[in-house]
Structures are given as C-alpha cells and as structure tokens.
Image (cartoon, grey):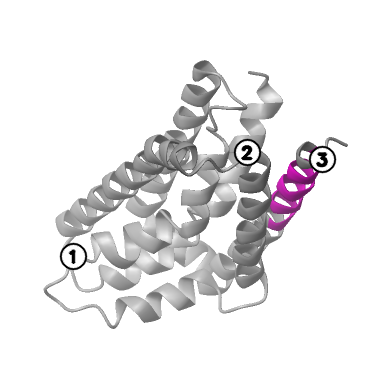
Amino acid sequence: MAWDDILRDFVYLWAVIDPIGSIPVFIAVTAGTSRMVQRKIAYQAIITAGLVLLLFIVGGQILLDLLEIPLAAFQIAGGLVLFLFALTMIFGESKPQAEIEESSHVSVHQNKAVFPLAIPSIASPGAMMAVVLITDNHRFHIGQQLISTLTMLVVLLITLGFLLLAGRIQKLIGDAGASVVSRIGGLILASVAVDSVLSGIKVYFEI
C-alpha cells in the first residue's frame, strides 16, 4: 500500500471524524466536572467510537455480501451519502453547534460519553460509511485493510489527544475556529465523495 494511499485514507478519515470539531462538544458535555471525570469521559468516548467503527469494518462487508450489493453500487451510494453529509458540514449548522445543542437535551442519567460525543460527534454516519468503503474486501487485500484500520485508530488517538487538551485548544481557536475547521473538512469530504461516485460509475459502466 503506497504512502499516498495511506495519506488519502488519513485525510478522508480526518474529514469525517473531525477531531477538532469534537472539542466544543466535549467541553459542553463535561462542563462543571472534575479533571478526572473529563479524562474518563474522553477515554470512554474514544473506546466506544472505536468499537462502533470496527463493528462497521467487520459487519458492513458481511451485510453487503448477504444483500449481494455490487461494489460499484455501494461506491456510488456511499459517495452520495458522504456528499450530502459534507454539504451539511459546509452550509448547514456547524458540527459543534448542532451537537452541543443535542447534548443539552440528554438526560443526566444518560452517558454523555456515548451520546452525543462518541456517536454522532466522533463515530458519525459519514465515518461509519467511510470505514466500510476503505476496507472493502473486493478492492483491498487483508494487508491494505489492516493499514486502513490502523490509520483510523491513529485518527482516533489524535482525537483523544485533542479531547484531553480541549481546554487549551478551545482558548486558542475558539468556537469560530472549530466551526471553520469543520467546514473546511466538509469541503475535503465533498471532493472525496465526488471521486467515489465517479469511480463507481466507471466500474459499473465499464468505462
């Protein structure tokens, strides 16, 4: 697997997971808690998100095979879904603002490390779709899939680092900065989504 492929997957996963965009969400759900509790929530969120994405890496391919969905169709559908997701990141309510509002509606008895921090802030629908696409058995051998999975874990570890340093980063870039980064990520994701659709069309029509 070439380094440019690894870099592509890294940028792809960075855009859909959006580590910086999760910082304001983390600060909102941990407001008023001790440093120890904040660290516990950060670790719980990353572990939960990681397990969810790993589940999609393993189970997503099995589901495709059971339904006999051709790769090209999944590429096109996945690209379209990711493109719509990217448009909401660019033009809609920014990720931090939307998910902070969601956190205010969560009962105090619910684990905010799971919702909205792990899902949908970190393991977003776009991220779930992305990990299935970059580990497809019909296009990538097991070695490539392992590298893509490790790349996902690296992005999650970086996200954990950002959460543990959330207070300092928030002071540095502010909510506006996190919103800008999220929208730039949306633009990158839109480009990746269009490329996925075009690749699927080429395969389907044997162009």
Q: Which residue is mark 1?
A: 111
Callouts 3 and 1 close, C-beta under 8 Å: no
Q: Amino acid at mark 1?
A: Asn
In primary-sequence order, the first of circles 2 and 3 is 2
Give the x, y percent position of residue 53. 39, 44
Q: Residues within 10 Å of mark 1 (few under 14, many from 20)?
A: some
Q: Amino acid at mark 2?
A: Leu
Q: Amino acid at mark 3?
A: Lys
Q: Which mark is residue 202?
A: 3
Q: Is residue 140 left or right of residue 60?
A: right
Spatial CA distance of label 2 from label 3 is 12 Å
* 100 or 169: nearer the viewer: 100
Prevalent SS, magenta region: helix
- Name the element at disc 2: helix
72 in relation to 40, above or below: above
Q: Is residue 103 left or right of residue 175?
A: left
Q: Nearer the viewer, mark 3 or mark 1?
A: 3
Q: Is residue 196 left or right of residue 141?
A: right
Q: How many marks?
A: 3
- Measuring 49% from the left and 18% from the top, which residue is drawn there? 142
Q: Which mark is residue 71?
A: 2
Hey, which quadrant is residue 114 in on the image? bottom left
In primary-sequence order, the first of circles 3 and 1 is 1
* 64 or 132: nearer the viewer: 64
Q: Nearer the viewer, mark 2 or mark 1?
A: 2
- Name the element at disc 1: loop
Hey, which quadrant is residue 201 in on the image? top right
Callouts 2 and 3 close, C-beta under 8 Å: no
Give the x, y percent position of residue 178. 54, 66
Q: Residue furthest right?
A: 207
- Residue 167 visible here: no
The quadrant in which the C terminus is found is top right
